Amino acid sequence: MSKTKERIEAVQEGKKLRKKNQLAATKPDFHMMSIVLMGVFVVFVMIWGAYQSIHLINAAPGTLESSVLKVEDNSKNAGKTIDVDTLIQKILDNVAFEAELNKLEDSVAEGMVETAVGTDMRIYMGNGTFADELLVMTAADETAAKINMENAKTHLEETKKAFRDYLPEEAKKVEKAVCIRCGSYVFVCVTSDYETAEKTINSIIKE
């Protein structure tokens, strides 16, 4: 009887030991889980840091972002004379602007946009809450017009940054600005109706 009891106790002890081993095998390894989670966190921080670095580089002063939607070079029409007065009037008549555009005094315009020597520049703008604008630059030659084109893009970037913080919708409008060079002429139009502006300018260039 004692041997039977001892066997039963041995079997029970064996069951307890196996159960303990099973529980130990299935118990989560919190130390390993901590290491894995820490690794994931480090990778996330590295990716986020890289993203922020790229963003800061793109937003650094003097860095032009690729934000001007319609930049064209119609040099195939270079050499022709364009009636600037007719072009300006046609744009004002056909393109939808959210603000009434008025011509700036030459002295004011010169302080807003740099131009190559010998350039005739005209700027039409709305009030301060709208980014709507029409800029026409007539250079002495094509080389000077290329300089004006770069100055015009710089002007657009500065305008976009000025609106970005307090009127983001206007900043988006600047991002879709039409900026076209044809020979010695540069035409820039900021409007939500940029497709009509582009077609109107090109229609006169190709006449």
Image (cartoon, helix red, strand yellow):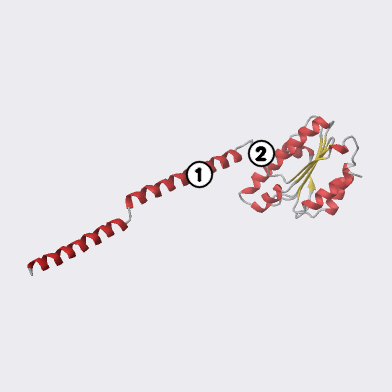
In this rendering, does residue 195 appear at all? Answer: yes
Left or right position of 102 against 49 = right
Residue 207 position in % (x across, y down)? 92, 45
- 153 shown above or below 19: above
- 61 shown above or below 86: above
Neighbourhood count class around disc 2 (C-alpha, 10 Å): few under 14, some 14–19, many 20 upward: some
- Report which quarter residue 205 is drawn in: top right
Q: Quadrant of the N terminus?
A: bottom left
Q: Residue at x 7, y 67 (%)?
A: 2
Residue, disc 1: 47
Q: Residue at x 81, y 33 (%)?
A: 119
Kind of residue indicated by mark 1: Ile
Neighbourhood count class around disc 1 (C-alpha, 10 Å): few under 14, some 14–19, many 20 upward: few
Residue 3 disc label? none
Secondary structure at badge 1 equals: helix
Q: Earlier in the sequence, mark 2 or mark 1?
A: 1
Residue, disc 2: 64
Q: Residue at x 74, y 36 (%)?
A: 150
Kind of residue indicated by mark 2: Leu
Q: Residue at x 61, y 37 (%)?
A: 61
Residue 59 position in % (x across, y down)? 60, 41
> Toward the viewer: 83 or 17?
17
Mark 2 against mark 1, which lies toward the viewer? Answer: 1
> Toward the viewer: 70 or 163?
70
